[in-house]
Image: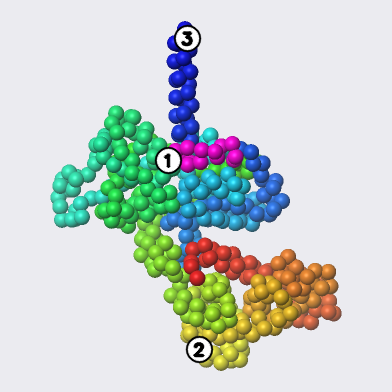
């Protein structure tokens, strides 16, 4: 009996060790469970703050910059979820799978918006939303370099056709990913050891797939949708060998964030009934043509440190007025989407949408000429900036400048006057003068005797400043100075 009890204890101990090992293997955070579970922040706190903070990864499908515009599957869905909650969205970029969980653990974010495979080990640490989509894992391998000149049978003879052929071989996967657990399980299922080469956790799946293409590693594992979109650009890849059954992919919240989880699931249920959701999914995982265009573009943030073909011109003139060139680039995008022949219904034209009278004052003779447009536009911004010399906060001063560039200096002057009349700070744009520029859309305000320049469609400068700075935040994440 004593021996029997001792054996039970040993078995229980081993089982517990295995569960703990699985939890640690899948997240890299052995202490995460207790710490995440102790945090009480939930939907009520998010709404009180007016901001949802989410963490995602910088990758070819989740979140990136292309031709000056932030894009990505997770990015587009996050925007819609924040709108559903009626809060602002703040996105943080994670360097690795480990840091995704760590930021949630340290109360730095409310939500992990990343394509996480829902596994039993991870469910001990976080709560998952309903699945966003189903996929399965496949082996990613490379055909022979001269495969196009070889017969089909010769090509096939160089490839693995069944996972059992991996016994004794090595597969390279990212540290602390669900792929490691899948390979461990696969080794047991096929009754033979598959050696695992652990790669740094900061590598994206697309980067690891590219390592297979370049011959730096022999095999890797990837979700089928990611493997398929990458294989469309790299036809030398073979992704025909499945290594798992269907798996659910979801986002994650802390176990205590019950209300946030319920709200996320309600939103997912609604959006997955709409065409919009499937358009977004197809855009990043099915549209092979657009994927190839992005991958080949020098204005794709995963390729080069560029926003547009006018970066050097923008940098040159931004330095003259001591602005971060990425902020000026965001303004140019807002004005023209970097189209030098763009024109507006009001008669503005060029990269910086200069009006005819303003162009004449600035000495701009050809508003469609990028050099003249950016030089003239930044000169005008500098003139406006100087008119706000009483505003000590440089960031607020720039916001007043940008608002004036959109709707005119004197309408902003009126909004500052209205702010004074309503006991608000006339030297602060955020939550003060910005609110008053909106009020100048109403007769009760623009007809006041103290208001000299009348009606302005206030939503335009209000949104203009907001969108430029939000885009600037994206640019700062992706583009170095």
Residue 366's label in the rendered image is 2
Task: State the extent of the magenta-drawn residues as a range.
Answer: 24-36
Circle 3 is placed at which residue position? 2
Residue 266 location, quadrant: top right
Assign a secondary structure to mark 1.
helix
In depth, the one of 356 and 188 nearer the eye is: 188
> Total number of numbered labels?
3
Judge depth for marks 2 and 3 and give the one in front. Answer: 3
Instruction: Give yes or no for residue 205 being in the magenta stretch.
Output: no
Q: Is residue 346 above or below residue 48?
A: below
Residue 178's label in the rendered image is 1
Query: What residue is at 70 percent from the left and 46 percent from the top?
Result: 44
Assign a secondary structure to mark 3.
helix
Q: Earlier in the sequence, mark 1 or mark 3?
A: 3
Q: Are marks 2 and 3 in contact (CB under 8 Å)?
A: no
Q: Is residue 98 above or below residue 424?
A: above
In depth, the one of 323 and 345 nearer the eye is: 323
Q: Is residue 182 above or below residue 92?
A: above
Whole-Å distance between the Cαs marked 2 and 3?
95 Å
Query: What residue is at 51 percent from the left and 38 percent from the top?
Result: 30
Provide the major secondary structure of the magenta segment.
Answer: helix
Query: What residue is at 47 percent from the left and 70 percent from the top?
Result: 307
Q: Earlier in the sequence, mark 2 or mark 1?
A: 1
Image coordinates of residue 146 in percent, x first then y, are 18, 56
In depth, the one of 111 and 267 nearer the eye is: 111
Image coordinates of residue 317 in percent, x first then y, are 53, 82
Image coordinates of residue 259 in percent, x first then y, are 65, 41
Residue 240's label in the rendered image is none
In depth, the one of 43 and 312 nearer the eye is: 312
Q: Earlier in the sequence, mark 2 or mark 3?
A: 3
């Amino acid at each position: 009996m004593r021996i029997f009890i001792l054996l039970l204890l040993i078995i229980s101990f081993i089982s517990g060790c295995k569960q703990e090992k699985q939890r640690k293997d899948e997240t890299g955070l052995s202490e995460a469970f207790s710490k995440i579970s102790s945090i009480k922040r939930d939907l009520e706190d998010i709404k009180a703050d007016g901001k949802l903070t989410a963490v995602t990864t910088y990758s070819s499908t989740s979140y990136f910059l292309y031709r000056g515009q932030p894009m990505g599957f997770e990015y587009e869905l996050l925007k819609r979820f924040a709108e559903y909650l009626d809060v602002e969205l703040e996105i943080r970029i994670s360097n690795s799978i480990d840091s995704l969980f760590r930021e949630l653990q340290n109360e730095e974010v409310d939500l992990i918006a990343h394509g996480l495979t829902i596994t039993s080990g991870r469910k001990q640490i976080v709560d998952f939303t309903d699945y966003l989509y189903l996929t399965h894992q496949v082996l990613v391998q490379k055909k022979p370099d001269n495969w196009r000149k070889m017969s089909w049978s010769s090509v096939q003879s160089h490839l693995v056709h069944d996972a059992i052929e991996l016994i004794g071989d090595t597969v390279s996967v990212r540290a602390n990913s669900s792929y490691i657990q899948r390979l461990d399980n696969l080794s047991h299922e096929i009754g033979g050891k598959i050696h695992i080469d652990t790669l740094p956790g900061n590598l994206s799946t697309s980067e690891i797939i590219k390592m297979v293409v370049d011959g730096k590693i022999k095999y890797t594992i990837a979700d089928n949708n990611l493997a398929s979109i990458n294989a469309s650009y790299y036809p030398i890849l073979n992704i025909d060998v499945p290594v798992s059954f269907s798996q659910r992919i979801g986002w994650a919240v802390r176990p205590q964030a019950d209300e946030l989880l319920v709200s996320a699931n309600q939103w997912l249920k609604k959006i997955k009934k709409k065409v919009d959701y499937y358009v977004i999914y197809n855009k990043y995982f099915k549209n092979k043509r657009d994927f190839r265009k992005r991958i080949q573009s020098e204005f794709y943030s995963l390729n080069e440190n560029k926003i547009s073909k006018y970066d050097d011109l923008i940098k040159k003139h931004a330095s003259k007025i001591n602005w971060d060139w990425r902020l000026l680039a965001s303004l140019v995008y807002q004005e023209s989407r970097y189209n030098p022949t763009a024109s507006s219904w009001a008669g503005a034209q060029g990269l910086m949408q200069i009006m005819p009278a303003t162009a004449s004052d600035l000495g701009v003779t050809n508003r469609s000429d990028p050099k003249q447009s950016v030089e003239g536009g930044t000169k005008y911004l500098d003139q406006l900036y100087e008119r706000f010399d009483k505003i000590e906060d440089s960031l607020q001063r720039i916001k007043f400048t940008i608002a004036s560039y959109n709707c005119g200096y004197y309408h902003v002057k009126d909004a500052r006057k209205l702010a004074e009349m309503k006991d608000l700070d006339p030297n602060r744009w955020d939550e003060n003068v910005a609110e008053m520029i909106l009020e100048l859309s109403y007769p009760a305000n623009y007809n006041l005797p103290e208001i000299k320049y009348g009606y302005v469609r206030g939503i335009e400068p209000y949104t203009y400043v907001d969108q430029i700075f939000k885009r600037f935040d994206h640019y700062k994440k992706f583009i170095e100075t």
